[in-house]
Amino acid sequence: MRIIIIVAVATNGVIGRANGEMPWHIKEDFQHFKKATMGSPIIMGRKSFESLGKPLKGRENIVVTRNANLNYDFDDVIILHSLNEAIEYCKLLNKEKIFITGGGEIYNQSISIADEMIISHMKFEAEGEVKFPEFGMNEWYIDSKDDREQFEIITYKRKS
Ligand SMILES: NC(=O)c1ccc[n+]([C@@H]2O[C@H](COP(=O)([O-])OP(=O)(O)OC[C@H]3O[C@@H](n4cnc5c(N)ncnc54)[C@H](OP(=O)(O)O)[C@@H]3O)[C@@H](O)[C@H]2O)c1
């Protein structure tokens, strides 16, 4: 099972605002995200899930929280209480790949265990308090690049 981080990052490292909002809305990037993740489990932090407001269709939505009492009125959302628990749960699903879909706290905790990162590098700076962690190319190599008008999608794979 490959653990894949998928994220969109501005040139200054920003991925979101403290109030949960995304600083930009680019349809082409949402389409890329949808196509990449469709059919696979997605793991996200409670704050990112709440900023979405509802589960994403066609994917098993796994939300992590430290709050033992958290519950949502959605049948198709799994709530778990650590990142490790979420990964172990996914292993039981026998899926070829799972996606880590944010936000900042969850990316910070998962970058050391991810096998791949699919990063949409936006071609602009953005205002926001939440950033993607810095990473060194000593641990990663570039597997592919896909240049679009407003962003470039780079797939990084972990060096073995
Ligand atoms: N640009 C992108 O691609 C992208 C993608 C996703 C999100 N975002 C942005 O990122 C921002 C949200 O990121 P964030 O860092 O504020 O929050 P987050 O990572 O989405 O969620 C943080 C929450 O996750 C739970 N959590 C974190 N680590 C945990 C652990 N080890 N075990 C159990 N629960 C854990 C906690 O929930 P409790 O407080 O309930 O315990 C914590 O408050 C938003 O602005 C959003 O728009 C951007």
Image (tube, rainbow, N blue to C red):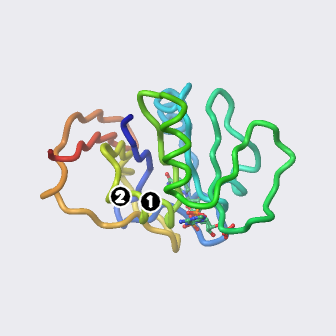
Image point (63%, 46%), residue name: 62
* In this view, 101 is above or below 28: below
Q: Quadrant of residue 134?
A: bottom left
Is the shortest distance between ligand 1 and the CB of mark 2 under 8 Å? no
Q: Quadrant of the N terminus?
A: top left
- Alpha-carbon distance for marks 1 and 2? 6 Å
Q: What residue sits right under mark 2 in the picture?
A: 111
Query: Percent x, y for residue 58?
Result: 65, 26
Q: Residues within 10 Å of mark 1 (few under 14, many from 20)?
A: many
Quadrant into which the C terminus falls: top left
Badge 1 element: helix
Looking at the image, which residue is at 56% across and 25% down?
39
Left or right placement of residue 105 versus residue 121 in this view: right
Q: Quick check: marks 1 and 2 in contact, CB under 8 Å? A: yes
What residue does disc 1 label?
107
Q: Is mark 1 within 8 Å of ligand 1?
A: yes
